[in-house]
Amino acid sequence: MESAANSRPDLAAALFRLIGASIPVNYTEEEEAQRLYAKLQNDHERLSKVISLCGTPKTPQQLYIAATACSWLGGNDELTAKYAQQYLETSGWDRLSYGTMIQDGVTISRWAKSRAEMYVILAQAQENLGKHEAALTNFAEAYRLEPYDAMYAVKMAGVIEHARSRKEALQFLKQQTLTPHYRPLHYKDEHGNRGSNQTFRQIIDSHILKLESKED
């Protein structure tokens, strides 16, 4: 791993973006990042280099890149959880997108979305480590930040089923049918066309059926 003095998080960001990450970059690093990308043989080596270029992560930028790259790379859940937890103790990387966007009638906070995604990285690593209650807490925090995203509820149900029981997981999913986001959302898009967003309902219903089809 690079020493803290030799860490180059801007180069790490540029290389990570070439691998497919949607993160802010300093475009002065692009040319060197492209050379590195071509030099390294595969994405495993490239992701390892991204992490290495963060040195010993301390800043929100370093922690965000290192935690996300570790989760993509896999194989070290302890380190992934450590970096994600440390990132969430900061106010966040200030170059990440802020403001809002509208998707299928739902107003989404970019800040909340990026924060929720880091809670998921932390929770997934904890689940892999067998820390089910901690994982459940952090999936729940992601769900609190983005209550319109049913996949967080599904992830919570998965932990509940594994750590407790299928019956309790099923009960939890059925409770989600009582939330406002379960109701179809009728909206007009930017062109004035009417739409109906039933994604939340469809995801919850399909996973309820999936659990109901299982046998204890």
Image (cartoon, rainbow, N blue to C red):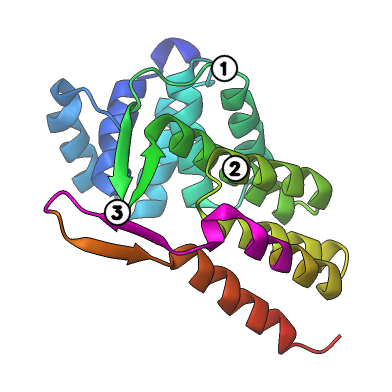
Q: Residues within 10 Å of mark 2 (few under 14, many from 20)?
A: many
User: On the picture, is 82 further left or further right than 130?
Assistant: left
Is residue 98 covered in magenta? no
Q: What residue is at 76 percent from the left and 51 percent from the top?
A: 129
Sequence-wise first label, 3 or 2: 3
Q: Secondary structure at mark 2?
A: helix
Sequence-wise first label, 2 or 1: 1
Q: What residue is at 35 percent from the left and 53 percent from the top?
A: 43
- In the rendering, at what x and y percent does residue 121 appear? 57, 44
Taking the view exactly as shown, the residue that stands out farthest to the top is 5
Q: Quick check: can you spot residue 15?
A: yes
Q: Which circle marks residue 142 in the picture? A: 2
Q: Give how far apart the Cα atoms at labels 3 and 2 are.
A: 35 Å
Camera-nearest residue between 99 and 56: 99
Q: Which residues are magenta?
A: 174-191
Q: What residue is at 64 percent from the left and 37 percent from the top?
A: 79
- Residue at mark 1: 90
Q: What residue is at 63 percent from the left and 20 percent from the top?
A: 89
- In the rendering, at what x and y percent does residue 180 appear? 56, 54
- Residue at mark 3: 41
